[in-house]
Amino acid sequence: MSDQEQQATGVVFNIEKIYLKDQSIEVPNAPQIFLEQAAPQIDVQLRNQSEAIGEGVYQTVLTAVVNAKVGDKTAFLIEAHQAGIFRAENVPAEAMEPMLAIGCPNILFPYLRETVSEAVTRAGFPALYLQPVNFEALYLQQRAQAQVQPEQTTH
């Protein structure tokens, strides 16, 4: 949004800080795992969490847990929490949740992707690049599930 658009609507959305909140790398079966010839099976789990940390200031944390296995042996396990502090003022209430669930993760994802790739390489494995994520589709899917679940519990 341009400065003129922000002034006209009064809406403010700024990135205050992007940082790596936490990261862990485990290679529990080293050095034997490096002798394996089979390619590891990769499982990636993503989570997004946002919270207000001040007046009009929010923290969003995008978490990736990457588990790579060769057979029943863990090749590596990486967990990374990429975070951002965002200023959002005069945002309409109905736009706040989508902004935190879609907009902020879209900003953080390239940083998380780089962090995971670098961690995999530092752990001694070929680079791994997380595939692009459609956070809007995930958000809509979660909302649809949330609407179905209360209906299921009332029967």
Image (cartoon, grey):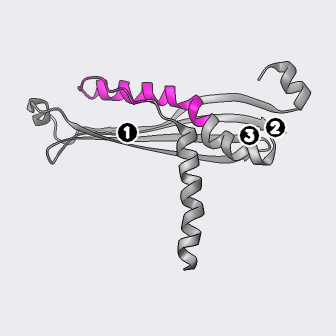
Instruction: Residue 48: name its quadrant.
Output: top right
The one nearer the camera, 113 or 77, is: 113
- Magenta stretch secondary structure, dominant: helix
Q: Position of residue 153 (x, y in %)?
A: 54, 75
Q: Is residue 143 magenta?
A: no
Instruction: Residue 91: name its quadrant.
Output: top right
Q: Is residue 124 magenta?
A: yes
**Separation of marks 3 and 1 at Cα, in angstroms:** 27 Å
- Disc 2 marks a residue whose amino acid type is Glu
Residue at (58% x, 47% y) in the render: 140
Q: Position of residue 136 (x, y in %)?
A: 58, 39
Q: Earlier in the sequence, mark 3 or mark 1?
A: 1
Instruction: Characterize the local packing of mark 2: few (<14), some (14-19) or many (20 or more) Cα atoms within 10 angstroms.
Output: some
What span is colored magenta in the figure?
A: 104-131
- Disc 1 marks a residue whose amino acid type is Ser
- Is residue 154 shown above or below 109? below
Which label sits on residue 57?
Answer: 3
Drawn side of residue 21 relative to residue 96, left or right? left
Instruction: Determine which residue is flagged by label 1.
Output: 24
Q: Nearer the viewer, mark 3 or mark 1?
A: 3
Q: Position of residue 58 (x, y in %)?
A: 69, 41
**Separation of marks 2 and 1 at Cα, in angstroms:** 34 Å
Q: Secondary structure at mark 2?
A: strand
